[in-house]
Image: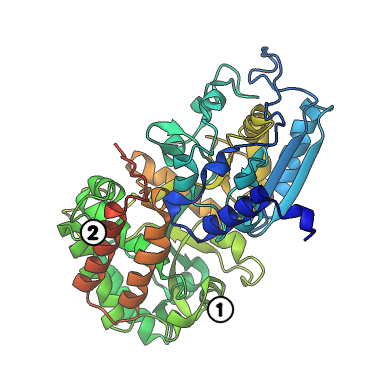
Amino acid sequence: MAQSDLTRRSVLRRAAAAGVLAGPAAGLLSSCALGDDDSGESTGKYEGTVSDKNPLGVKEDAPLDIVIFNGGFGEDYAKAHEAMYKETYPKAEVKHNAVVEINTELQPRFVDGTPPDFVNNSGAGQIPLGGLVEQGALADLTPLLDAPSLDVPGKKVRDTLLPGTIEAGSFDGKMYVLNYAYTAYGIWYSTKLFEAKGWEYAKTWDEHIALCKKIKAAGIAPWTYQGKHPRYMSWPVISTAIKLGGPQVAMAIDNLEPGAWTSDAMKTAADAWYQIVKDKYILEGSPGLDHKQSQTEWCNGKAAFISCGSWLESEQKAVTPPDFNMSIAPTPSLGAGDKLPFEAIRGTAGEPFIVPAKAKNERGGMELMRHMLSMKGAKDFTGKVSSLSVIAGAADGVSLPFGLTSVTKALAASGSNGFNWIYPVYYRKLERELVDAACGEFFSGRTTPAEFLAACQKGADTIAADSSFKKYKRS
């Protein structure tokens, strides 16, 4: 580094960035992150004229700075959306950059007040969204929601979205995050294997345990899981509890209510899932496997079931045997007392996209989102990455692989009974560290159901008592 670079401001910026990377979710950004600038240079935004063809007031020749997470979806879908934008605004220079570590790459730019105009804030290295919202670092996307759809006549963008999309990206009633991929979470199995063995997916918990016994007798482990990321197994446990006790179980967890994790519904669900641990229905060595390794073992027929989201088929396509025909299914019902039917499945919008509040071309970032949320943009996304988007009807007429077809059927069967929880969005640390650790102990057989839930509750109570985390209320 040149000596001239070692100014007081550059030192403070680097120190702030270092603190950002190490700090808690709610305290991610210093005041510098909001673009404080003592250089005397203008921080004004590009502004255009609002019209019927340009409802967001995009400056037609303003450059658009885009950063995409280069993960399971790749970047081809993003380039296609950018080409759509370029066709609409041919004078605009579109800069595309695909990175793996979003946090590492972009935190210094947030601290300097020079963030991109559009960010796919995803992956293990994403910037926790709760902290960004608390610091005022994200643009309110209400103008996007109220803009007319690009190619669905007579509808605003908000009217084209699947249920739960706005809620999944909202904090205190305002949407700051566009979660673009619509994901179902459930239990996956190979239709080919089940047909060959004469097995049928079980709809009740007692039937599931009886099936696990048959599977184990056939020389196959009934279950495996992403051992190094054991939170994947929290999803079926919470789903089972919600189906038993109703959506208020999720609401209590999201709102950090005392005793939410140790409710009667959660206790009953944890007791049920403990049976696959104590009866040794989990593939030996699973706790030491990462997500790819465990999913590959499953694809190779070493285990019958695995918990995952609907990105699984795309993530495993390189190693999935021909005609494996993976299918998703809801968690089995505990009994007739369940408040939600067997078909009820967790479905939610995921894969977050944001427009920073200090973006030079804020309206251009929103306009790119409007192109993504067109029927054309959504169909192209599904065709390229084998994932559903949040646009209602966008998968109609698109040729889908076997697994994704099973997802569309499961979501259709679930209908208005679908459910979700949002605490990982509000408090990333709670799921990624505290619940994750508790699940690791539980599914490795080192703790009892009561100890597992007590550890989760202790984690939630820790977040609730920590003033460095802004608290959000789901209603």
**Coordinates of residue 279 in the picture (x, y in percent):** 28, 83
Closer to the camera in the image, 460 or 420: 460
- Of 170 and 209, nearer the camera is 170
The answer to whether 107 is drawn above or below residue 371 in the figure is: below
Q: Residue at x 64, y 44 (%)?
A: 112
Above or below, 209 against 370 in this view is below
Instruction: Say whether residue 454 is left or right of residue 239.
Output: left
Q: Which of the two residues, 325 or 154, is positioned nearer the viewer here? A: 154
Tag on residue 300? 1
> Which residue is pictured at 31% across the width and 40% down the height?
473
Q: From the viewer's perspective, is the residue at label 2 or at label 1 nearer?
A: 2
Q: Residues within 10 Å of mark 2 (few under 14, many from 20)?
A: many
Residue 41 in the image: above or below residue 53: below
Residue farthest to the right, as pictured: 91
Which quadrant of the figure contains the C terminus?
top left
Q: Which residue is mark 2?
A: 261
Q: Is residue 412 left or right of residue 295?
A: left
Label 2 and label 1: CA atoms lie apart by 35 Å
Question: Looking at the image, what colour scheme do you see?
Answer: rainbow
> Residue 20's mark?
none
Q: Is residue 435 left or right of residue 85?
A: left
- Of callouts 2 and 1, the N-terminal one: 2
Secondary element at tag 2: loop
**Dot 2 amino acid type:** Trp
- Whether residue 398 is visible to the viewer of this picture, yes or no, is no
